[in-house]
Amino acid sequence: MVFSAFTIRGLSSIISRKGYVGSAIISNCLTKPTLRASAVSHNFVRFQTTDSKPTIRKNDELSTSTLMDFGLYVAECMPKYVQKVQIVTGNELEVLIAPEGIVPVLQFLKDHHQCQFSQLVDIGAMDVPSREMRFELIYSLLSLRFNSRIRVKSYTDELTPVDSVYDVFKAADWYEREVWDMYGVFFANHPDLRRILTDYGFEGHPFRKDFPLSGFVEVRYDDEVKRVVVEPVELAQEFRKFDLSSPWETFPAFKALPSSSSAQPSPPTDTGKK
């Protein structure tokens, strides 16, 4: 809200005449904004940091130890389903579970008094074709009570369905529909599992690694027949593996190791020419 000079002078005069409590302080704030701003600016200068990279989260051993203890506690409570507990970059707790334990583990994390992860933030997926169970499911949960987050991971393939968590978190409705649309992971017992992002009659699942970049069909408006037509693409691009060495590689665990028989560059030979 912006006040004009007339409005500020009027407010200060009214406050002074009425004799409100703290009128001198309020009047000073209204009539001398420059002095107040300078005082605030000095306070900000006082708290300047000397870190060269202040945006990078520092390692907190106490927080890491607390998260690991909680992950091990979940593993002790659900030993039938929990397969691995780990702390990843940024002090984030991840719990890897078996596919049949998705519903009971998420129900436990939501209802248990020591957990109270009552919000489902997101459901994501990842396709790693080199794995036998190529699809990895990621459930991100938030606990407002303890101001904490946790990621629950599971796995499946193209043919094996996983149980829907719609009965546990109603927010899973559209999340599971998106994973089904993009990856083709089937969620059993979902009330309305249909595509949500792609068009009617779309073929395939675009986020799979074996999905061609150009797609299977082309949708365009044909000026001759005066309507939209669907036809196969003329220059279809087959599946190619873009596995290049990159200094920004984030997931080295998913890259195939180079073969030992790879050809090494030969040293330059002296041709005798100057």
Image (tube, helix red, strand yellow):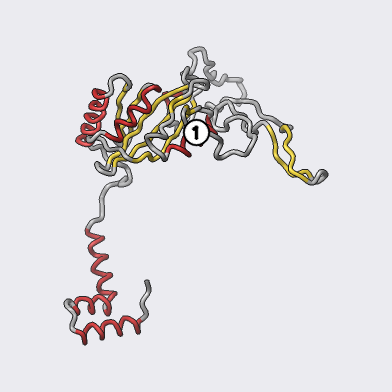
Task: Give coordinates of residue 108: x percent, y percent.
Answer: 29, 30
Rendered image quadrant of residue 41: bottom left
Frontmost residue, 274 versus 125: 125
In this picture, residue 267 sits left or right of residue 166: right
Position of 160 compared to 119: left or right? right
Residue 4: image location, x then y, percent:
37, 80
User: Could you say where residue 239 lies in the image, as x and y percent from the top left?
Assistant: 61, 25
Residue farthest toward the top in the current orientation of the protein: 261
Q: Picture coordinates of residue 121 (x, y %)?
A: 38, 40
Quadrant placement of the N terminus:
bottom left
Residue 135 sits above or below residue 25 on the image: above
Q: Taking the image as drawn, is residue 24 in sight? A: no
Element on which disc 1 rests: helix
Residue at numbered disc 1: 179
In the picture shown, does residue 20 fall above or below 248?
Answer: below
* Residue positioned 33% across, 31% down in the render: 107
Kindly identify the amino acid type of the residue bearing the numbered disc 1: Val
User: Foreground residue, 124 or 117?
Assistant: 117
